[in-house]
Amino acid sequence: MLHPTRPLALRSLLALAAALALTACQSQPRSPALNQGATASGSIQDAADTVQNARRQVNRTTAALRNLVDRPQDIPAQYRTVLAELQRLKSDAAEIDKAADYMRAKGDRYLADWARQISAIGDPDLRNAAFERRSEVAASLQDIFKSHQTVKAAYAPYLAGLADIQAVLGADLGSKGLATVKPFVDKATADAFPLVAALDKLAAEFRSVGLSLQPGGR
């Protein structure tokens, strides 16, 4: 099974920072900023896809664990599948954290620069309108950052539970070992639900920002 390139989320969030800066100066109908904004909007949609891939990875990891404890057949092979899916899961979680942290720093710098540019506008009505648009973008970014924190908090118990299960199974793949971890696999399955919901929300917010940056977007 092919998996998306891991640095995609980081590249997409870099594009988001650039696209937000472009929206402040998209005043001419044929400006190159329009084409660049459209391109960046597509990259932000890619970021949403990356988060959705992380969501699917949660489901794949949970399914691999359930398959091992509920339908043990070729146990060593099933356990290797669990380990591979768990590694991809950890990689996804780390990539989302890295991208969001970088985006926060870029977003703060961008909003400060945008405010300075708006302050130079002479017409008070246009200046106020520009500040309102800036406030909308700032609120969208804050929503993304808050959702990332929710995702991070939801990942924590899920990953911790999986690490404990791995520790037990790494020493005992016998029937008693599988029976020992089964209640904890049940708990991990339950912990996956709020994580999946949080990832869905984060992906939706990326998509919303991406659509708003398209030429003529809302």
Image: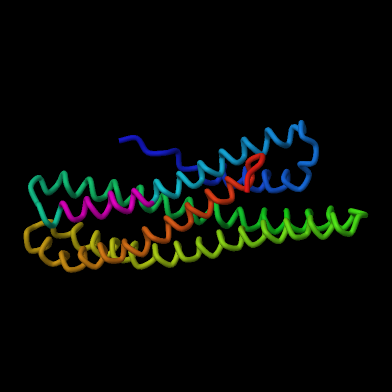
Q: Establish if 78 lies above or below 130.
A: above
Q: Quadrant of residue 101?
A: bottom right
Q: Tell me which secondary structure the magenta stretch mostly adopts.
A: helix
x and y, in percent, of residue 1 in the image? 30, 35
Query: Residue lying farthest right?
Result: 122
Is 215 covered by the magenta stretch? Answer: no
Q: Residue at x 48, y 50 (%)?
A: 95
Q: Nearer the viewer, residue 131 or 100?
A: 131
Q: Is 106 situated left or right of 115 in this image?
A: left
x and y, in percent, of residue 107 in the image? 67, 55
x and y, in percent, of residue 136 in the image? 67, 59
Q: Is 86 situated left or right of 74 in this image?
A: right
Q: Nearer the viewer, residue 5 or 39?
A: 39
Q: Residue at x 46, y 54 (%)?
A: 94
Is 61 covered by the magenta stretch? Answer: yes
Magenta span covers which residues?
A: 55-67
Q: Is 84 situated left or right of 203 in this image?
A: left
Q: Establish if 90 lies above or below 157.
A: above
Q: Identify the colour scheme used.
A: rainbow
x and y, in percent, of residue 56 in the image? 34, 48
Q: Residue at x 31, y 66 (%)?
A: 191
Q: Nearer the viewer, residue 142 or 204?
A: 204
